Image (spheres, rainbow, N blue to C red):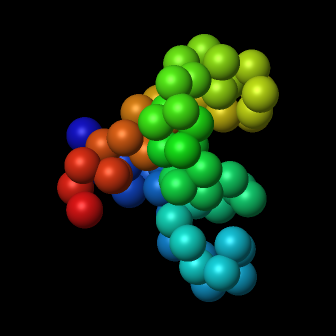
Amino acid sequence: MVESILNRITLNPAICNGKPTVRNMRITVETILQYLSGGDAIDEIIEMYPFLQKEDIQACMSYNRKL
C-alpha cells in the first residue's frame, strides 16, 4: 500500500506550491479530502474530475492517515 501511495501522491515545488497532489496534476490531496469531508462519495468526485481514478482518492485518504 505504501508503494501505491508513493506512486499516486506527489510533491513537486513547481505544482500547487509544493502541496501534495495527485499524480503531479493540479488537484491537491487537500481538495479531495475536503470533498470527502463534505459528504461527497468517491464516485461523485470522479464524476467532477474524470481524470481521477478510485485508487487516487484512496491514496489521498491513506496519505492523510499517515500524517
Tell me the quarter of the picture where residue 53 sits.
Answer: top right
Side of 26 relative to 29 (left or right) = right
Q: Along the line of sight, which residue is nearer the eye, 21 or 39?
A: 39
Residue 6, given in percent of the width and then of the height, sits at 38, 56
Q: Residue furthest front?
A: 38
The residue depicted at 65 percent of the width and 27 percent of the height is 45
The residue depicted at 34 percent of the width and 52 percent of the height is 63
Answer above or below: position of 41 versus 10. Answer: above
Q: Is residue 33 visible?
A: yes
Q: Along the line of sight, which residue is nearer the eye, 48 or 39?
A: 39
Residue 32, given in percent of the width and then of the height, sits at 56, 43
Q: Along the line of sight, which residue is nearer the eye, 63 or 8?
A: 63
Q: Is residue 54 visible?
A: no
Q: For the image shown, how many numbered marks are present on the structure?
A: 0
Of the 4 image quadrants, the one containing the N terminus is top left
Of the 4 image quadrants, the one containing the C terminus is bottom left
Side of 7 relative to 12 (left or right) = left
The residue depicted at 41 percent of the width and 33 percent of the height is 58
The residue depicted at 33 percent of the width and 52 percent of the height is 64
Answer above or below: position of 17 versus 24. Answer: below
Answer above or below: position of 5 versus 41. Answer: below
Residue 57, given in percent of the width and then of the height, sits at 49, 35
Residue 31, given in percent of the width and then of the height, sits at 60, 50
